[in-house]
Amino acid sequence: MRFFRRAFELETALLAIVLGLAALQFGLLPALVQISPKELVLVILIAALTAPLHYGLMHETMHGHLYGDERVDRPIGRLLGILLGLPWETMRFGHLAHHSLNRHTFDRPEVLNPGEPRAPAAAIYYFKLVLGHGLSYTLMPLPALLPASTTARVLSLMGSGPDVEQLRAAALRTFTNMRRRTALRLDLVAIFALFGLALWFWGESWPVFVGCIAARWSVLSLLDNAPHYGMPLDSGLDARNTSLPVPARWLVMNGNYHGIHHRAPQLSWRELPGAFTQSNAPTQGSWFASIARQFRGPLRLEDV
């Protein structure tokens, strides 16, 4: 009982930190204090460094692990998504698809198709790596603002292939569900309103707010595929477990144990280190090295 009480308190403390930082980022900071240009750079840096913690809490709500009650986790997850500019419903759909169809067509950005020239593919790849993944997650939900009858037509643009058909069918079920679609629309309206207010609050210093958002999306883009980069396309539930100093694990909510998370998504972030120890599996390099490895660029299909 004491363990669960401590866990509850820990999640609440981390959530309070993230929401407090978000309040400062969305306009409370310029309302409270005058800050120098050097300090403004520090604000953007803090926004970037805390992005994994913010997303990590949101990730726990996607799996229902934050407080273990959907009636609590879902609204908290939606709020966290709004503050990132990434609606919870689409993020949750994409993440669960990543679990069920690991390395699907849209989940292997580094892989070159047969005969595809490397140079133009590399330009697209590096843009996605540095910022594009985060940006795409903000654009994908926008078709939800269209009438529900257009969903099938929009999803037909995904292309073709066995895994694409599975994704399309799942997306059609998810985004024609009017409860979910309404929630997604409300979140999009909240994002537009909140971001607009933040720009107004920051006034002439609005580039600082834009820099905070861009920095967060960039960090999340860099982390998006890092545990899977260069892994075989038939890797199934496999993903890399990497080493990271204990204090830093809190900032990423033990996201360095991504392989364990794929094998046992029913475990909360607090349970991952123990599960990794019990597995007797070795770490596959450092967490930082897994991020840096991605800058090798696109890979040929036969190499993975």
Image (cartoon, rainbow, N blue to C red):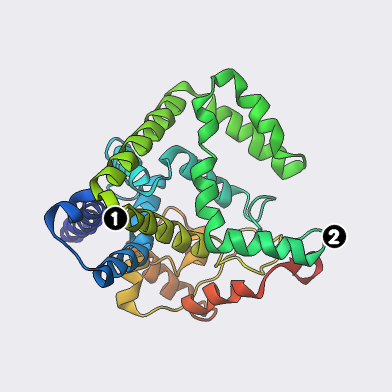
Q: Is residue 47 left or right of residue 184?
A: left
Crowding at mark 2 (Cα within 10 Å: few <14, some 14-19, many 20+): few
Question: Going 51% across and 50% down the picture, which residue do you hit?
Answer: 135
Q: Quadrant of residue 78?
A: top left
Q: Position of residue 299 (x, y in %)?
A: 73, 69
Q: Earlier in the sequence, mark 1 or mark 2?
A: 2
Q: Nearer the viewer, residue 57 or 65?
A: 57
Q: Is residue 127 left or right of residue 95?
A: right
In this view, the residue farthest toward the left is 32
Tag 1 residue: 205
Q: Quadrant of residue 247?
A: bottom left
Q: Quadrant of the N terminus?
A: bottom left
Question: Going 19% across and 65% down the picture, which residue do you hit?
Answer: 35
Question: Going 80% across and 58% down the picture, which residue do you hit?
Answer: 113
Observer able to see residue 226: yes
Q: Quadrant of the C terminus?
A: bottom right
C-beta proximity under 8 Å, tags 1 and 2: no
Dot label at residue 114: 2
Q: Position of residue 258 (x, y in %)?
A: 49, 65
The amino acid sitting under disc 1 is Ser
On screen, 184 above or below 260? above
Q: Nearer the viewer, residue 149 or 25?
A: 25
Disc 1 is placed on an element classified as helix
